[in-house]
Amino acid sequence: MSHAKALPGFNAISGQSILLYEHVSSNDARESHEIGGSSTGTDLIAKDHALQLDAQDSPSIIVLCTWMSASLRHIARYVNGYRRQHPTSHIIIIRCDPADVVRYLKHRQLQHLAPAVSAIQRLTEDRQKSEANMILHVFSNGGSHQACNLLQAYKQFATTPFPRHVTIFDSCPGHSSFKRTIAAMSASLPKTPGLHLLSLISVYVLVSLCWIAVVPLRLPGPVEVNYQTLKHPKAMRNELSRCYIYSVADPMVDWKDVEMHAQAAKKHFSVRMVKFETSGHCAHVLVDGGVRYWRIVSEAWNERGSVERESKIQS
């Protein structure tokens, strides 16, 4: 499925793995129409002027670092939820492809994110540096990998500090294990029996080779490096608060790993932990039609104000 069909209004800015939706205000759209331009229905989602009054209460941009091999159809569920909550916000989707993670060296991975860095910097420059203007929503260990890459790429390519933001961790971060890595990388394999078997064998061979290279030398794999990075205050500069959403029933990321990470993060960050009991991996939004999930997301953003006030008082 093409992104144009699944996610109307989004444009690819770095292959098909980084997609950008730029909100067009009703005034901008009207000016474009008057000079002969055109706008899609999606671009005019905030046509009602009343929505403009809420723009300062919404993030300038929402960054979704999605789980490994996430389908556009599933990503759209989160895009639609955020559009309902923050119709005036821009949205960037950073997808995680296992082939890219394995195939490319780190510097290539960072270069791939340079267009995302440029877009974030451009779309957040209208807010004061003291204000929170971004939500960083991270899904699973694949999204954690891309979030860490984004932080490094921003430091390398941007001319301004990483925006002040709220971080939401969905089903992450977790430690790596052979079984869980296999499960994560095989979750989106082709369903055709013969092709599925061949793909599954390839996954086992690839993960086994990585394990043979890393475990005997006691080297930290990328998942472990990301796990440590995401609780380090220097790496997560300008984070106002964070919320962990996780489940006891998650078959890919152990809920105990998430809680351990959250407890350690409390030394440096404002932390909220929300535990589901029965939802699967990156599937908490499916519980009760998403009512609880989107309430949690809304509260995570709205509660940033108290953290902002505390930081101003301390400074």
Image (cartoon, rainbow, N blue to C red):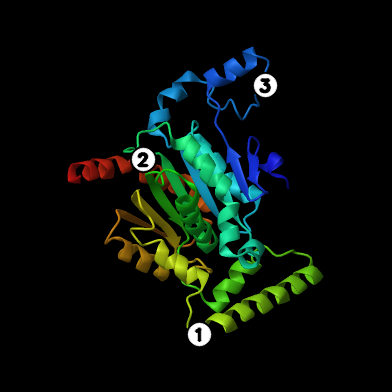
Q: Which numbered disc, 3 or 1, marks the residue that appears first in the sequence?
A: 3
Residue corresponding to mark 2: 132
Whole-angstrom CA distance, mark 3 to mark 1, is 58 Å
Q: Amino acid at mark 1?
A: Leu
Residue corresponding to mark 3: 38
Rate crowding at label 3 as few (under 14), some (14 to 19) or many (20 or more) other CA atoms within 10 Å.
Answer: few
Residue sitting farthest toward the right: 194
Query: Viewer-proximal residue, 290 or 126?
Result: 126
Q: Which numbered disc, 2 or 1, marks the residue that appears first in the sequence?
A: 2
Q: Is residue 217 above or below residue 12?
A: below
Q: From the image, state whether disc 3 or disc 1 is nearer to you.
A: 1
* Quarter of the figure with residue 124: top left
Q: Position of residue 180 (x, y in %)?
A: 55, 73
Q: Secondary structure at mark 1?
A: loop
Whole-angstrom CA distance, mark 3 to mark 2, is 32 Å
Q: Secondary structure at mark 3?
A: loop
* Quarter of the figure with residue 43: top right
Q: Residue at x 33, y 54 (%)?
A: 272
Q: Secondary structure at mark 2?
A: loop
Tell me if label 3 and label 1 are in contact, CB under 8 Å. no
Residue sitting farthest toward the top: 34
Residue corresponding to mark 1: 217
Query: Viewer-proximal residue, 211 or 118?
Result: 118
Q: Is residue 52 above or below residue 191?
A: above
Q: Position of residue 310 (x, y in %)?
A: 22, 44
Q: Residue at x 47, y 46 (%)?
A: 158
